[in-house]
Amino acid sequence: MLSGLKKHLIISLIVRLILIIYGEIQDKISEVPYTDVDYRVVTDGSMQIAQGHSPFNRHTYRYTPLLAIFLLPNIYLHPCFGKILFAIFDLAIALIIRKIIIEEYYSLLLNQSTSIEDNKVKFEKKFNGNGNKNKFRLFGSKKDMKLIGTSDRMKFERMANFAAYVWLYNPLTMIIATRGNGDAITSALVLLSIFYLLKIQDNASEKDNERNVIKSGIFHGLAIHLRLYPIFFSLAYYMYLSDNKYQINSIQSLLNCFLKPNRKQIFLILTVLKVLIFLTGVFYLLYDYKYLYESIIYHFVRKDTRHNFSLYFYLQYLNSGGKVNILEKLLTFMPQIVLIILISFHFSRTRQTIQFGVFLIAFIMVTYNPVITSQYFVWFLSLFPLTVNNFRSLSFKQIIMLITLWFAGQGMWLFCAYFLEFKGINSFDFIWLASTFFFIINIVILQMLIENYDDSSIKLK
Amino acid sequence: MEILNSGFHRELKYSLKFAPVISCEVLLVQEIPSSVYVDVDQLFNLNKLNKIKTFVPYYIDVELPTSKSSPFKVYMFENVRKSVNITLPLHFRYHEPSDKKFNRVEIESPKIYLSNCPVSRGQGVLLPCRNSSEITDFLELASASFCEWTETQYSTPITLSFLIPVGNIKSYAFVLPITIFISWIACLFLTYVIIKKSREISKKVL
């Protein structure tokens, strides 16, 4: 008999493999390919590398050369290699999510035992001499403690597996990965950086902590190198490493946390910078300015005003003829920056809240992004399972309502866009309304999630 | 020549009839106005499926609006048979917003050339060879070789015209304030929700 987790890993791998095979068949017979065009671009990039050229010789190759290097077996082995690799990363994500939650258990156990130790010391001080005898009466026998331990352990196993399944069986991520979108790699790196960040503990040795800061920094740097967006998690990570984060009660103390970095915070910054400078440097030397432009600068100057889910799409389109107004740019860019900073400061105090905080930052980034397509949803969908157990207070009805609302918002938008794209009807004003409506739905979901977030649902009995 | 579908993604369908049938190769040179583009990746894919053999001598940026792009030519190759049917998928670019609801886009009939015919007729011109359609590497586009083709006249050259929806510049007056207003109201609202939750959590911690 396979354990529950293994069974689900195998099932979800098989589902993904079937989707990959299905994709191959559709690509062969249909004019509308299943495979994402970006997957072909990256494969062509790998081809260029295999022939000893720069991947940027392929038009529209706008990723790190690392991606083309990872997909070299697409040329040597089979063009599906990359998709299988992404599917394996999907499984790895589930395992990392699970591991983070299991670690939560050990961390709580450790904290509890240290607080028991503390109590014991206090107790012994009070009843000098008789300490040993009374201790057992207070905390029960060792056997009892172990029993509580196992049932807790099982509760955490259950929560961890549940979170992993939430990821594994998400149809959106299944399809995105099997169409050949490599964002699963970035998501895995983001999760690994969080994993090592959470390993840093007050009661661990300085040396261990520093080692984990460096590991976290390396993965964070890699994630930024791959996809840029994780850079917005940096402030939250940085604040989490502050020693005085529990004592923030005024602007003054907040600024202290921010402006007077401790060793760990400096280590994090330096490691991330080193990784970024190293990778950027190496690829700049190999592929010149073209690398900098295509994979970094382009993403900042890109102006795609075609219709998409974003609140800002129509505004940008109507603006596209004239000059860029600085004030307007600021007004559209500031809200998300304000919210990201706010969340970084408010939700990076405890192990629990930072996981929720990073998820919120990703969600807000996508909601306020000037361009939104469904691929962007992976940014926060991969972080949601970490915190899924914190929403026990949401009723089943509420959850169904939120999910329905979210898809209804997208459905409405697609309906309006269909008339424009395929019927040639001028429905721009309606698409804008639908985008605005979808934005409001996302804000309502954010509000519901924040209000119903319960950081005490993950605890020992 | 006729256009299929509606909206931003359409297909240009050519039906040529040859009489008498000769063993030649035929080349269609289609002028594409700046408001239209072809997706080269899509064409490569169709080439692989043997649906169409094309050559586009430049890099086509599919994201640019009409005002920032320029017209170009698509070369389509086929063998002469009794009737030749070619379907070229086209996509329309966004136009700059204006006070009109639609912009008119016009596509003219292609020029038709023949080559490798048993009997050469008339003056030849140098145009890309048939094997250019195999080029998928953008750096090699310039190295496409040229062959001699002879223009051939046909009976019914036509101009197709369609209307493409355009963003309404008048909407700017309300889109700007409402978009910004909503984004900021949402920001303030979430600020309130976040701070409230944060207070709740820190109370528990203490």
Image: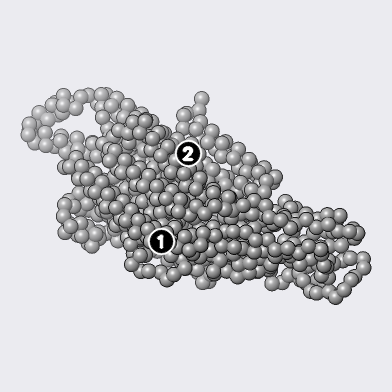
> Is the residue marked by circle 2 packed among few (<14), some (14-19), or many (20+) residues within 10 Å?
few
Q: Which residue is mark 2?
A: A170
In the image, residue A70 lies at what x, y percent?
A: 56, 54
Q: Secondary structure at mark 1?
A: helix
The chain ID associated with circle 1 is B
In the image, residue A151 lies at what x, y percent?
A: 32, 26
Question: Which numbered disc covers residue B128?
Answer: none
Q: Nearer the viewer, residue A419 or A277?
A: A419
Distance from Cα at disc 2 to Cα at disc 1: 39 Å
Q: Is B103 situated left or right of A446 in this image?
A: right
In the image, residue A15 lies at what x, y percent?
A: 56, 36
Q: Amino acid at mark 1?
A: Tyr
> Is the residue marked by circle 1 packed among few (<14), some (14-19), or many (20+) residues within 10 Å?
some
Q: Which residue is mark 1?
A: B172
Q: Nearer the viewer, residue B141 or A147?
A: B141
**Residue visible at 63% across and 48% down?**
A33
Residue lying furthest front: B100
In the image, residue A192 lies at what x, y percent?
A: 41, 48
The quarter of the picture where residue A164 lies is: top left
Q: Amino acid at mark 2?
A: Asn
Report if residue A366 is visible in the image: no
**Residue visible at 7% across and 34% down?**
A126
The answer to whether dots 2 and 1 both sit on one chain is no
Q: Is A400 situated left or right of A283 in this image?
A: left
